[in-house]
Amino acid sequence: MTDLLISGDVIAADNEKRAAALKSDYEALGAKLSRQSVDIDRITRKVSEFFVAVPSWGVGTGGTRFARFPGLGEPRNIFDKLEDCSVIQQLTRATPTVSLHIPWDKADPKELKAKGAALGLGFDAMNSNTFSDAPDQAHSYKYGSLSHVDAGTRRQAVEHNLECIEIGNAIGSKALTVWIGDGSNFPGQSNFTRAFERYLDAMRDIYKALPEDWRLFSEHKMYEPAFYSTVVQDWGTNYLIAQTLGEKAYCLVDLGHHAPNTNIEMIVARLIQFGKLGGFHFNDSKYGDDDLDAGSVDPYRLFLVFNELVDADHRGVKGFHPAHMIDQSHNVTDPIESLMASANEIRRAYAQALLVDRGALDSYQADNDALMATETLKRAYRTDVEPILAEARRLNGGAIDPVAAYRASGYRQKVASERPQVKGGSGGIV
Ligand SMILES: [Mn+2]
């Protein structure tokens, strides 16, 4: 039996209010899609089988370099975080797994596994942290970790990643994501070549410890916390890493880790073509690594990314199973609400991409009909697929309107009374 933290009655009562309208909207959309020879139930089925992992760190209130304004009922530890994650899953039915960050979420693996099982949650990729210092560690990461000039510091960073694999293995994870803050703030501070050699050597040691059925994801980021250069700067560097390490190594694309206006969907296509797309950290951005909610600023870009994923699936690309994870920071919203909204936006982009008439698109491309080719994408994108998303949630026991049901449940007020309020703001993201 799964521990359900939102009463089934609350969801049923809220759904009841919306059921008739949904039925009518779903039928109208079904009729419209059938005129395009699209079976709405097939799309709904595919959407309900599409999942995205929630980041454990996402359920705490985030912050900026300037301040953090703690929210009500913030999770005190990983077990509280898992409870919040289970609420997101219960209402959306889109997020059955959680991605952990070590050491932030360090706990007895047996207890983690038991809590996850009780809440009906599994564990997605493990995330190591060698970009900040843990209280008792021997060597500081101030000047880097896996690429540090000091061998002892590099060794410590490798050992930490090995520990993440060990914990992950015990709780059923199948992947390790490595993101490092290594880089430089001044021209001349670091030798690009030597730093990258040291990084690759350290990553080889991690790769060697990877269980047979695991994947290793490296995540590129063009700047921050290092502002002049980063060791894993861009997708080209990332591809070289995956290529150098071996077949279990893949590239992770965090949508916010690119320069403004970068054609991310084309990067995705390239990585798919050469068998190295490992997965995503979904979020949105206006200027940099803003970690805004997925689809909140540029939903068309999210759709274009999904267009590449659906295209790859349609072409039957071998061994294609990218990991889908959210990586966001919530500064002004209730993190549970933001994560539910984001999971739905991600599914929305997927559903819209499923509606692209790929045969027509191929023909327009072959005829150099640029206008009709782009209209083919736009036609799918302009379709309001909300009835499909809502029906997928409803069919699986979720909420037709997750935010409304969540607010009706009083969950935030309840945990606010149980979890002591964090006093005062502090700098830095969580
Ligand atoms: Mn990320």
Image (cartoon, helix red, strand yellow):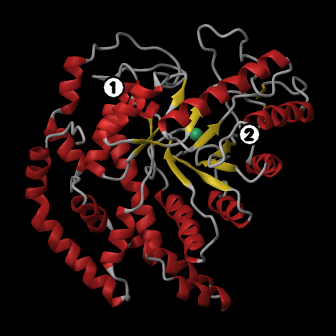
> Which element type, helix, strand or loop, lies under badge 2?
helix
Q: Residue 105, position in %: x, y? A: 48, 25
Q: Image quadrant for the N terminus?
A: top left
Q: Residue 427, position in %: x, y? A: 51, 16
Q: Nearer the viewer, residue 16 or 61?
A: 16
Q: Residue 53, position in %: x, y? A: 45, 46
Task: Tell me what residue is drawn at x 42 percent, y 60 percent.
Answer: 50
Disc 2: which residue: 207
- Residue 361 position (above or below residue 200): below
Quarter residue 334 falls in: top left
Q: Quadrant of ligand 1?
A: top right
Q: Is residue 1 visible?
A: yes
Mark carried by residue 88: none
- Residue 192 position (above or below residue 11): above
Amino acid type, callout 1: Asp
Q: Nearer the viewer, residue 254 or 380?
A: 254
Residue labelled 1 has its Cβ within 8 Å of some atom of ligand 1: no
Mark carried by residue 80: 1
Closer to viewer: mark 1 or mark 2: 2
* Mark 1 and mark 2: Cα distance apart in space: 32 Å
Mark 2 surroundings: few (<14), some (14-19) or many (≥20) residues within 10 A = many
| Left or right position of 178 against 74 | right
- Residue 140 position (above or below residue 223): above
- Residue 118 position (above or below residue 420): below
